[in-house]
Amino acid sequence: MGELVTKRLVVRDWDLGDAEAALAVYGAEDVAQWLTPETHVVRDAQAMRSVLHAWIEAQPNLVAPAGRWAIVRREDGLLVGGLSLRLLPPYEEDFELSWQIRPDQWGRGYATEASHAVMRWAFDQGIEELFAVARPDNTRAIGAARRLGMEWVGETTKYYDQLLQVFRIRPAELKRV
């Protein structure tokens, strides 16, 4: 993907040097409580470095346009979060967009701004639809999905063996946002 640049942000590949800053995202309990069962809570910088190493190594082997990226604020280079596009289990047919923002940066529209850039890029790669899933009590994620222009399409236990709200967006819907 290279870099995607928005008005305030840069969406870029992860780097091992991001470990300390990434820990402020993935090590935060307010973020970790909502991560999928496959994503482990990260407790220290060394563990975060190991996670980033795995993500960096896996990136070239993912089915396009899947990937994991850092979200960095342009004005000062602060790493404010991460996002990913990946195939949802168990059938790996549906692409999920997910975002994680460090709690001290919540409410500033970073998830929406970065996600819009990645959605446009994914649709340019030929993806026909993207999904976001959230637990019913994850009101922040549900709100973000709606701000992204995603449509609620129902509930399911299909993806992670837990009840999830499912949101979807297609290219024509993104153009209206």
Image: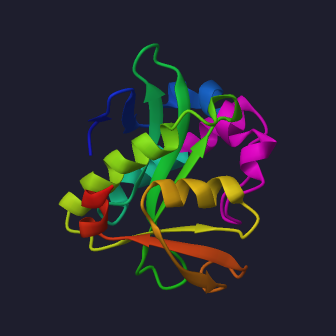
Residue occupying the point 32% across, 33% down:
6
Quadrant location, the C terminus: bottom left
Q: Is 42 inside the magenta-drawn segment? A: yes
Left or right, residue 36 beside residue 75: right
Reply above or below: 162 against 83: below
Residue 159, position as x, y percentages in the image: 60, 80
Coloring scheme used? rainbow
Does residue 113 show up magenta in the picture? Answer: no
The one nearer the camera, 50 or 85, is: 85
* Residue at 33%, 28% in the rendered image: 7
Q: Quadrant of residue 52 in the image? A: top right
7 is higher (above) or lower (below) than 84: above
Q: Nearer the viewer, residue 159 or 51?
A: 159
Residue 166 locus on image (x, y percent): 56, 75
Q: Position of residue 42 (x, y in %)?
A: 73, 43
Horizontal relation, residue 100 to residue 71: left or right: right
Q: Residue 46, image x and y in percent?
A: 70, 32
Q: Residue furthest top?
A: 76
Q: Is residue 28 left or right of residue 164?
A: right
**Residue drawn at (61%, 86%) of the image:** 158
Q: Which portion, as a residue range, is magenta?
A: 24-53
- Is 162 rendered above or below residue 43? below
